[in-house]
Image (cartoon, rainbow, N blue to C red):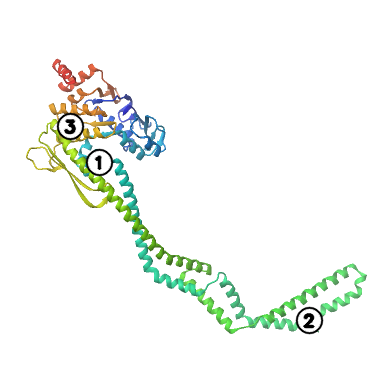
Amino acid sequence: MLRQLSIENYALIRSLQISFNEGFTAVTGETGAGKSIILGALGLIVGQRADTQVLSDKERKCVIEAVFEIGGLGLEKFFEENDLDYYTNVLIRREILPTAKTRAFINDTPVSLQQLRDFGTKVVDIHSQNQTLTLLTPEFQMRFVDTLAGNSGLLKKYSEEYTSFISAKNELSLMQNELQKSRRDKDYNQFLYDELEKAQLVENEQEELEKELNLLNNTESIKQVFGEILETADRQDDAALPRLMSAKSQLSKIIAYHADIEELYQRIDSCIIELRDIFSEIENLDENISYSFERQQYVSQRLDLIYNLQSKHGVNNVAELLEIKSQLGNKLLITNDLSEKIQVLERQLSESEKRLLVLASELSEKRKIASQRLEQEVLPILADLGMKDAMLSVQLSHCDAFRPDGTDNISLLFNANKGGELREVGKVISGGELSRLMLALKSLIVRTDMLPTLIFDEIDTGVSGTIAVKMANIMKRMSQNAQILAITHLPQVAAKADCHYKVYKESDETTTQTSMRQLTEQQSVEEIAKMLSSENLTASAIETAKELKN
C-alpha cells in the first residue's frame, strides 16, 4: 500500500510530504484547489508521461517520491527479473529535469518508464474520471473479466506462445517469399554457375596467359634480336669477347710490374666470364623460345573467354569471378535448404497453433465462468446503489483468428430500467449510472485481486443523497481488502473515511501554491459541514456532519 508521498516543485506544489494509512482515505477540497495536481503527481510515480510544463520553478528539477509497502504481494520475482533490490518497503522516485529529460528509480536503481509502469500496475490502480469511460471499451471489459477470472498466469503463457507464433509466422512468410524468388532465379543462376564451372578458372591464370600471349605475339622479333647478338659474338675480328681475351693476354705479360695492372687484369677476366654467361643464356633462351600458332590461338581464346566473363559480371579479375561462382553455388543450395527449413517451421507453427488453441480454450472457459459470476454478483451491488431494475449481460463470442489476448470477442450489455432492452453499455447508460457501475465492478475486483491500493478520482460524479451514502459504504467495505483513496466532492463519502485530507491553496503577494494536510476529527466534521452548507458553518450542518460520520 502507499505509505508516503513527497512532491517537490510540481505545478503549484512547492514542497509537500504526506503519510497515508491503510483503510479508507478521503481527499476533499474546493474546485480548483489542486486535487488533480495530487493525482497527477501520483500518476507520474506509476509511469505516466510528463513534460516541463509541470515545473513550478523552471530552473529546478521536479522530484516526486513514494514509499509502497509490498510485503506479501509476491513481487519478489518482478524484482529478480528486473535485477532490482527487493525490500518490503519500496522507494519510487521520478525526476523531471528542466531540459525535459525524465529519470525514474526503484530503490535508487535507475529503471525505464516501462519498468516503472509494470511495477505501478502491480501496486496501485488510479481510477481517473477519464477511466470511467474506458468501461465502454471492449479492451477494458476483457481485462476486467480476465482479472475476475484470475487469468493473469494463463494470459502470460498465452502471450508468450502468441508472440512466438507470430514471430514464426512472419519468419515463414519471409522464407516463402525468398523461396519463390530463389525458384524464379534458379534457372538463370544455374546457367551462370554452369558457365563459370565449364570455364575451369584458375586464380592468377589471367596474368600468366597475358604474359605468354605477349611472348607468342613477339617471338619473331625476339629471335631476330637474339640471332644478331649471337652472330656478333661469334665474329673474331671486331667482337667484344675476342678483344677482351686479347687484352687479358697482353696484360698477363706485364702483370708483375705494377699492382694496379693486376687489378685491371682481374676486372677484364670478370668481364669475360660475365659476357660468356650472358651469351650462354641468350643462346638457351633462343633455343627454348619457339612459336606455336595453335598455342597462340588457344591462349587468345582463353583470354577472350575470361575477358567476356569479367565484362558480363562487371568484375576485373579471375578471383572475383571465382567468388561470384561461389555465391551462385550458395544461392542454388539455398533453394533446397529453404525448402527444408520451411517444412521444419511449418511443423513448429502447427504445434504452436495447437498449444495456442488449448490455452485460448482455457481462457474462454474461465472467462465464461467469470462472466456468469460477474452478472450474478454485480446486480445486488447495483441494486444497493439505487439501480434495482438494472440488467447486465456479458456476451462472449469466438473469433477465428488468434489475437494477443485469445480468441474471444466481448460485449457488455446493460439496461438500467425494468422491461428495457439489453444493449451495448455505451448506448444506454448515463454518467451517474456509469460511475455506479464502475464502482460496483471495482468492488468485485478488490475481493479477488491482490492490488493493494485503489485511488478514485471523483468516481461519485453524477450521484448524490442516499446513493452517495451507499457508494461511500461500498468504498468503506472495499477498504477491508485494500487501501482506498477517494478524491471526492461529496460529504457523504468523506464522512465514511477513516482518514480525511484537505487540499487547499495559499497565496501571498506574488505566488499561489497548493498544499494538503490531514484533518483532525473535529476539523473533518467542520469540513464536511462546509461541504453540506456551502461554507456556512451552521449548527445543523455540524450535527448533520456528525451524523454522517457516525
The answer to which image quadrant residue 502 occupies is top left
Mark 1 neighbour class, 10 Å CA radius: few under 14, some 14 to 19, many 20 or more: many
Q: Quickly name the residue at label 2.
A: 239
Mark 2 neighbour class, 10 Å CA radius: few under 14, some 14 to 19, many 20 or more: few
Q: Is residue 84 left or right of residue 297?
A: left
Q: Secondary structure at mark 2?
A: loop
Q: CA distance from mark 3 to mark 2?
A: 127 Å
Q: Nearer the viewer, residue 20 or 18?
A: 20
Of the residues under marks 1 and 3, which one precedes in the sequence? 1
Q: Are dots 1 and 2 in contact, CB under 8 Å?
A: no
Q: Quickly name the residue at label 3.
A: 461
Q: Secondary structure at mark 1?
A: helix
Q: Nearer the viewer, residue 60 or 215?
A: 215
Mark 3 neighbour class, 10 Å CA radius: few under 14, some 14 to 19, many 20 or more: some
Residue 208 at x, y percent in the picture? 59, 73
The residue under the point 22% across, 19% down is: 524
Residue 453 at x, y percent in the picture? 28, 31
Q: CA distance from mark 1 to mark 3?
A: 27 Å
> Can you name the residue that lies furthest to the top here?
539
Q: Quickly name the residue at label 1.
A: 146
Q: Amino acid at mark 3?
A: Thr
